[in-house]
Amino acid sequence: MCINTFPGLVLLALCAAWSGQARAAEEPTHPPAAERMPANVQLVETVMRREALHRLNSTTGVRLPRIRVFAANGDKLLYVVGWAKDVPARLQRALQQQRPLPSGESLADLLAQIDDSAGQPLTVEKLPPGDVVIVTAWAGWCLPCAPAISGLRDAMAADSARRYVWITVETDAYKQKLLMPGARNGG
């Protein structure tokens, strides 16, 4: 319980901030179950390989969510770090314009860094058929990931004319037990 005295005002503010974060953390931040996906969305749950996760942590740190959108031919159309209310509109614009980003990263390059939920390498050939592939990196501790996941699901459901493949990438190394001695090397 927080102390409501003058010396305890700072403590009170910290308790209020903590309780707000605790409530937000209780909200589900994981992707919805496959059975709750819109009919036009195929969910593919994955994990990031150990060396790719270490590279991500050491070069840029883990800023989540990371959302990459690819056309069926593998062209990257959109890359977003973080979440804002305008992301669904940006997604729709990118899909309408179909202009590839000037980036060297292809869908195949990205998939080479992740495994499916069974620990097997994921390749373009193993993906279900779709018009659009969305790759979302997330973690359970990421507060903006919850609205991002919900917002993406709603945006895909509203665009029922397209078939989406939604690849969710768990990036929490401790949850994956990738940092434990003797864990799979990922490659």
Image (cartoon, grey):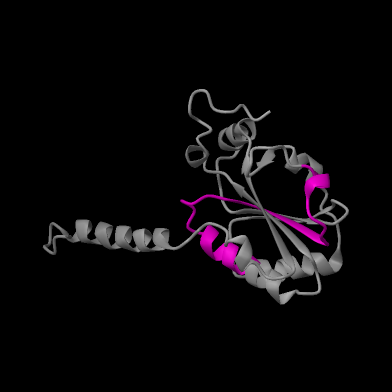
Is-magenta flag for residue 6? no
Residue 62 located left or right of residue 88: left
64 w.r.t. 105: above or below: below
Is 186 situated above or below 4?
A: above
x then y, percent, for residue 171: 57, 44
Relative placement, left or right, of 59 versus 122 is left
Is 185 rendered above or below residue 82?
above
* Image: magenta residue range: 123-152
Q: Nearer the viewer, residue 146 or 76?
A: 146
Quarter of the N terminus within the rendering: bottom left
Q: How far across and down, in percent of the image, does residue 79 sit? A: 71, 54
Q: Is residue 94 above or below residue 181?
A: below
Q: In the image, what residue occupies the spot 36% across and 63% down?
A: 23
Residue at the extreme right: 73
Residue 103 visible to the viewer = no
Q: Residue 16 appears at what percent x and percent y?
A: 28, 63
Q: Position of residue 30 (x, y in %)?
A: 53, 57
> Quarter of the image holding residue 99?
bottom right
Q: Residue at x 57, y 59 (%)?
A: 31
The residue drawn where x is 74% and y is 69% is: 40
Task: Please state, as top left, top right, bottom left or bottom right, where the C terminus lies in the image.
Answer: top right
Residue at image x 61%, y 26%? 185
Quarter of the rendering containing residue 34: bottom right
Residue sitting nearer the eye, 137 or 18: 137
How many circles with numbers are drawn on the protein? 0
